[in-house]
Every structure is written in C-alpha cells, then in structure tokens.
Amino acid sequence: MNFRSRKMVKGEDLNGAGNLFGGRALAWIDEEAAIFAHCQLKTERLVTKAMSVINFKSPARQGDIIEIGCAVVRLGNSSITIRCTMRNKTTHHEIVTVEEMVFVNLDEHGKPAPHGITQATE
C-alpha cells in the first residue's frame, strides 16, 4: 500500500472529545480513494458506490500528521474496489481502515460503463 496523501489534524477537525471527527476522517479517505481510483481507471466519470467495514482503531489529535494509503482489492467490469488505511505518520498506528470502497465508472448518461482496465498500476 502506498501512502500518498498527508494532512495535519487542526482544531476545526476535532470532535467534542478532542479527537479527529470520524466524519472528517471518512471525507478525507473518500477524497483520496476517489483520486486513486481516477488514476487507476483513467476516467473522469466515477462515483463512490459503497464503503464497508469501517474500523476506527485509534484516535488522532490536534497537531498529528496523518497519511492515507490505498490499494486495489479487485477490478470489476465497471468498478474498482479499494482498501484504504489512515495512519499516524510518526507512529504508523492505524487510525481508520476501510476494507472495501467501491467506485463505479459511468457513461455520459450516468449509467455504469466498462472501464476497460484489466490490471491495476498502483
């Protein structure tokens, strides 16, 4: 898994307990995974279809530098399934993992369309 994206946890990213808000973490992961999927499929019309098995493993606090990594799990006819991990850059402790994120390639009418990719490039 390649970790390509880094962010610093700021005050506006925190929940009431002083930890990184889970919704913010998932938004960052969704954005990074979408960019990763776009690069893999070389397409402009791509949507998130599903996120499953989300596991919040450890907290991130203000000032922490986090990094997000993605890897291809499988390629479908019109889809790509990706696994993502958010971890602390310094300690490498996993903060959040998403076992499967499914993205679907769309045609000009917004319908699923074959992407034509048979092998991931990572």
Image (cartoon, rainbow, N blue to C red):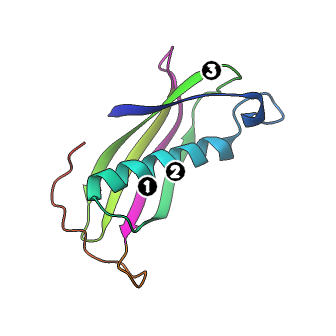
Question: The residue under label 2 is which amino acid type?
Answer: Asp
Q: Earlier in the sequence, mark 1 or mark 3?
A: 3
Q: Which residue is mark 2?
A: 30
Q: Position of residue 111 (x, y in %)?
A: 39, 82
Of the 4 image quadrants, the one containing the N terminus is top left
Label 2 and label 1: CA atoms lie apart by 8 Å
Question: The residue under label 3 is which amino acid type?
Answer: Asp
Residues marked 2 and 1 touching at CB (< 8 Å)? yes
Q: Nearer the viewer, residue 60 or 41?
A: 41
In what element is the residue under mark 1? Answer: strand
In what element is the residue under mark 2? Answer: helix
Question: The residue under label 1 is which amino acid type?
Answer: Met
Label 3 and label 2: CA atoms lie apart by 20 Å
Report if residue 83 lies within the magenta region. Answer: no
Report if residue 97 lies within the magenta region. Answer: yes
Please give the range of residues in magenta.
Answer: 88-105
Residue found 51% across the figure and 14% down from its top? 90
Q: Which residue is mark 3?
A: 64
* Residue furthest to the left: 118
| Labelled disc at residue 101 | 1
Residue found 25% across the figure and 42% down from its top? 122
Q: Position of residue 16 (x, y in %)?
A: 84, 35
In what element is the residue under mark 3? Answer: loop
Q: Position of residue 35 (x, y in %)?
A: 41, 50
Q: Nearer the viewer, mark 2 or mark 1?
A: 2
Residues marked 1 and 3 touching at CB (< 8 Å)? no
Q: Earlier in the sequence, mark 3 or mark 2?
A: 2
Residue found 38% across the figure and 81% down from its top? 108
Name the quadrant containing residue 107. bottom left
Q: Is residue 49 above or below residue 60?
A: below
